[in-house]
Image (spheres, helix red, strand yellow):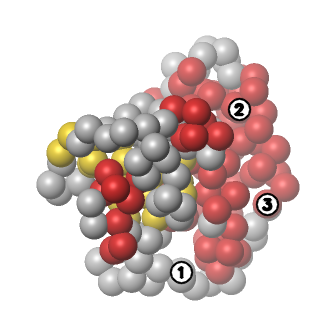
Amino acid sequence: MTVVGPDRRTVELATDASLSRALGDGDRAAFACVGGQFGGLTRDLDTPVSAPALTGAGLGTNGSVEAYEDGPGGACPVVVAGRRVRVAREENCGRCVPCRTGSVRAHELLRRVYAGEFPDDRLRELARTMARTSLCGFGVDAARPLATALDDFEADLRAHADGRCPGGV
């Protein structure tokens, strides 16, 4: 597994080892993005690094993990998910509607969170539609950061809609 960050490194782990073991200093990490650019966001760093366990947790299996810290100098899961959705909006090939239009709509709906609206059901349905009906892996994977942010960080999204960032970003 490749640990992404300032001290990028590759670590070999047994499949029953946890994400926190891959990170080494997992006690400082508040959450992680697992599986590359369109990896899933999670607070559960005890998830094993085996492909079945990562898939079962809704995370990516592309062999990378990026840890984030809360608080000053840290990161916010809402911002991390939003940046990944923005990449999907800008980089998709445009061939299928679920990915092309879905990524644009997902980005617009996430922007609404900052304006005080949290369209929870619409975001969940959009992520499901993109993941299930996109023609290629790009669209399927592009829905993952949004879907996992909705599952694991709903309170953070609601806080942003109320005008505050729990991570202090």
Q: Furthest residue to the left?
A: 7
Residue at (58, 85) in percent of width and height: 164
Q: Amino acid at mark 3?
A: Asp
CA–CA distance in space, label 1 to label 2:
27 Å
Viewer-side residue, 121 vs 33: 33
Residue 7 is left or right of residue 86, and the answer is left
CA–CA distance in space, label 1 to label 3:
17 Å
The reply to whether discs 1 and 2 touch (Cβ–Cβ < 8 Å) is: no
Mark 1, secondary structure of its residue:
loop
Residue 113 appearing in the image: no
Q: Which residue is mark 3?
A: 120
Nearest to N terminus: mark 1 or mark 3: 3
Residue 127 appearing in the image: yes
Residue 130, numbered circle: 2
Q: Which residue is mark 1?
A: 165
Residue at (34, 56) in percent of width and height: 21
The reply to whether discs 3 and 2 touch (Cβ–Cβ < 8 Å) is: no
Residue at (79, 60) in percent of width and height: 120
CA–CA distance in space, label 3 to label 2:
16 Å
Q: Amino acid at mark 1?
A: Cys
